[in-house]
Image (cartoon, grey):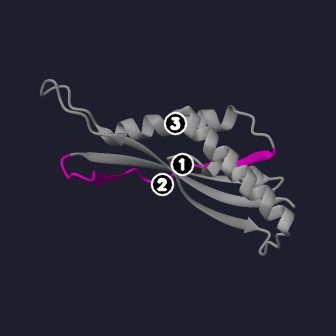
C-alpha cells in the first residue's frame, strides 16, 4: 500500500573551541553547510521503494545549549515529503540520528495485517542491526 509522509531531520553543528580570537566558529553557518550537503545527497541518492517529492529547507536554524551547558549546538531543519511503496520502505529514513519527526499524510488510516506487522518489525530489526554494525 503506497504511503505519503513528511519527515523532519535536524542537522547538528556544535561550537568548537577557538584557537585564536579571529578564528571564531559560527555554528549556525556550519549547520547550514551541513544541511546543504545532506540535501544534495538526499536529492541524488536512489532509495529503493521511495520517491522524494519535496525538500523544504526554509526553516530557520536554531541554537540550543548542550547537556553540560558549556557548549551550544546549532540545528538546521529539513522537511522531506516522500512517497513510499510500503511502510517498511520508510524505515530506512527514520533510523538515523538526525531524524526528529514523521507525519503520515496519506492514507488517513492504515490497517496492518499480522504479516505486515511481522515484516515491519523484521525490517526495523535488520536496519537497527545494520546501524549498530556501522558504528
What is the distance, in whole Å, between disc 3 and disc 1 at their CAs? 9 Å
Quarter of the N terminus within the rendering: bottom right
Residue at disc 3, secondary structure: helix
Residue at disc 2, secondary structure: loop
The circle on residue 36 is 3
**Horizontal arrangement in the rendering, residue 39 relative to residue 124 (left or right):** left
Q: Residue at x 67, y 37 (%)?
A: 43
Contact between labelled residues 2 and 3, with CB atoms less than 8 Å apart: no
Question: Which comes sooner in the sequence, label 3 or label 1?
Answer: 3
Q: Position of residue 124 (x, y in %)?
A: 68, 52
Contact between labelled residues 1 and 3, with CB atoms less than 8 Å apart: yes
Label 1 Cα neighbours within 10 Å, binned few <14 / some 14-19 / many ≥20: some
The circle on residue 57 is 1
Contact between labelled residues 2 and 1, with CB atoms less than 8 Å apart: yes
The foreground one among 58 and 62 is: 62
Q: Is residue 54 above or below residue 44?
A: below
Return the residue found at the far left: 21
Q: Is residue 125 above or below residue 132?
A: below
In the image, the segment drawn in magenta is: 49-70
Question: Which comes sooner in the sequence, label 3 or label 2?
Answer: 3
The circle on residue 13 is none
Residue at disc 1, secondary structure: loop
Q: Position of residue 78 (x, y in %)?
A: 54, 50
Q: Residue at x 70, y 60 (%)?
A: 5
Q: Position of residue 40 (x, y in %)?
A: 60, 33
Q: Residue at x 20, y 26 (%)?
A: 23
| Label 2 sits on residue | 59
Q: Residue at x 37, y 36 (%)?
A: 30
Amino acid at each position: 500500500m503506497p504511503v505519503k509522509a513528511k519527515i523532519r531531520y535536524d542537522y547538528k553543528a556544535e561550537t568548537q573551541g577557538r584557537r585564536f580570537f579571529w578564528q571564531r566558529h559560527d555554528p549556525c553557518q556550519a549547520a547550514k553547510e551541513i544541511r546543504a550537503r545532506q540535501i544534495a545527497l538526499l536529492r541524488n541518492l536512489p532509495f529503493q521503494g521511495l520517491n522524494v517529492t519535496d525538500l523544504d529547507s526554509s526553516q530557520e536554524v536554531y541554537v540550543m545549549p548542550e547537556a553540560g551547558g558549556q557548549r551550544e549546538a546549532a540545528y538546521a531543519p529539513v522537511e522531506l515529503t516522500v512517497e513510499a511503496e510500503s511502510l517498511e520502505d520508510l524505515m530506512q529514513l527514520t533510523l538515523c540520528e538526525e531524524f526528529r519527526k514523521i507525519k503520515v499524510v496519506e492514507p488517513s488510516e492504515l490497517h496492518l495485517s499480522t504479516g505486515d506487522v511481522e515484516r515491519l518489525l523484521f525490517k526495523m530489526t535488520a536496519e537497527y542491526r545494520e546501524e549498530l554494525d556501522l558504528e
